[in-house]
Amino acid sequence: MPRLQQYVRQLRPRNESHVNHVDRIQSLLTEGGSTAGATEMESHIVIAYNGGYENAPDTYDVEKESYEKSKHISEAIAKDIQNKTKASPKSMIHFGKGSGVMVDWWKGNATPKTDLYSTDGINISLKQRGGSQLMSGLHDETKSTFRAATEYMDDNAPKEVEQLVNSLGKVLKNIEVQGNINSIAKAIKTKVVPKQIVAKQGKKMVTINIDRKKYEQEMQNMVDWKSEMKQTGIVFKEFFENNYEFKKWFCYEAATGETKFRPDKYANSNWVVEFDPKTGKNNKINQLSIKNNVPSPYIKEITKKARIRIAPKTGSGSKVRLDLTARTSGSLRIDIKDEFLGGNSYLKENEDTFTNFMEKSFKEFTNSFLLTEEPLTEIRLFNRIKKWFKDISIKLLQKVKQLAVKGIRFILDFFEFQIDRIKTSGLEMFGYK
């Protein structure tokens, strides 16, 4: 990979760019469909379920004009929900942005699994088509989920669980650096320590003077952390592959929050709805639990397709906090291969990522020199590099266009971007709150 850096610098996203590419992509993806953000879209569906804007008991501050623009979409989704779940007409309630009530021993995020629920006990988790992540847990959330899975199994839980959980502290931790995460990632790859970093702080750009000695140590800490994370990830992957029953209960808790929100009958979900915000058609609606401690057959499908990995989780790679530093954290993730995506999941076994895309292209480029007997002059080398840049730019653009059709998360996965929170209006539709 070091040989590649000298050729691909100009292909990497620039930290200083002020063009909101995510918004531009989003506008392409939502063209012809609903333009409501996720929370508002949830409200639209509830309004539609409860009889429409004029008849619903609560319109959740949604403007009538906004609802009317895409009511054919929300009404189609609501109709599918009623047909599949059999929830009573006009019984749906929007959970909103509140927090759920957790069991006293749980440590982690109190965000409810439920987005809307009926008075019949139908608690629904809404997902837009394109989302494929069942869990992205930091240290405390992950430990609590392990405990829940162990409790489901009682004495039948694998003996090595406690040892595995104790090892999480080495990788599911916070790493703080001067400047932003994108800059230190670049410094590690290029082995060049910047004297200054220009980064985003809120809506403004700031210049940060770098303490070289401290930064070099931060770079080494990051490298060591990534290496430890990779090795630990292998151990956890093998554990889940060899312990199907535990994996099933772990996925069950991650999907439903049944143990986590035991005191709150509305915060844990027992149904999942994957909806299409562009048409409102072909929605996938599945039951998660039959009753307490009884997973549905759909959970077994999820378990077979679940891919466990340990990876960094960064709020925004380009931004810094008020103290001009940035933080990234280790997280345990559950990606559902071929799930919530109509059989076309981007997360495949061959790890189709930007890094592998570039490595393959560079390998083909260097191999081409072995297939010719022409003497290699500076002019010929320059022309070949120039042609390679042109060809790879075309291929990369085609790749991004293919992924854009499937959804924003496919593009983020391809470039290996991990997003924790985005406040840009409308992006909640893609799973970000």
Image (tube, rainbow, N blue to C red):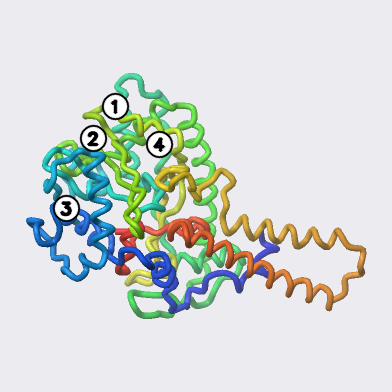
Query: Residues under labels 4 and 2: Cα distance?
Result: 19 Å
Q: Are marks 2 and 1 in contact (CB under 8 Å)?
A: yes
- Disc 1: CA contacts within 10 A as few (<14), some (14-19) or many (>=20): some
Q: Residue at x 66, y 67 (%)?
A: 392
In the figure, is residue 401 to the left or right of 205?
A: right
Query: Residues under labels 3 and 2: Cα distance?
Result: 22 Å
Identify the residue position indicated by label 1 in the image: 152
**SS at mark 2 in the image:** loop
Up-down relation of residue 381 to residue 413 (above or below): below
- Disc 2: CA contacts within 10 A as few (<14), some (14-19) or many (>=20): many
Identify the residue position indicated by label 3 in the image: 94
Q: Earlier in the sequence, mark 3 or mark 1?
A: 3
Q: Residue at x 67, y 62 (%)?
A: 2
The numbered disc on residue 259 is: 2
Up-down relation of residue 344 to residue 44 (above or below): above
Q: Residue at x 26, y 49 (%)?
A: 109
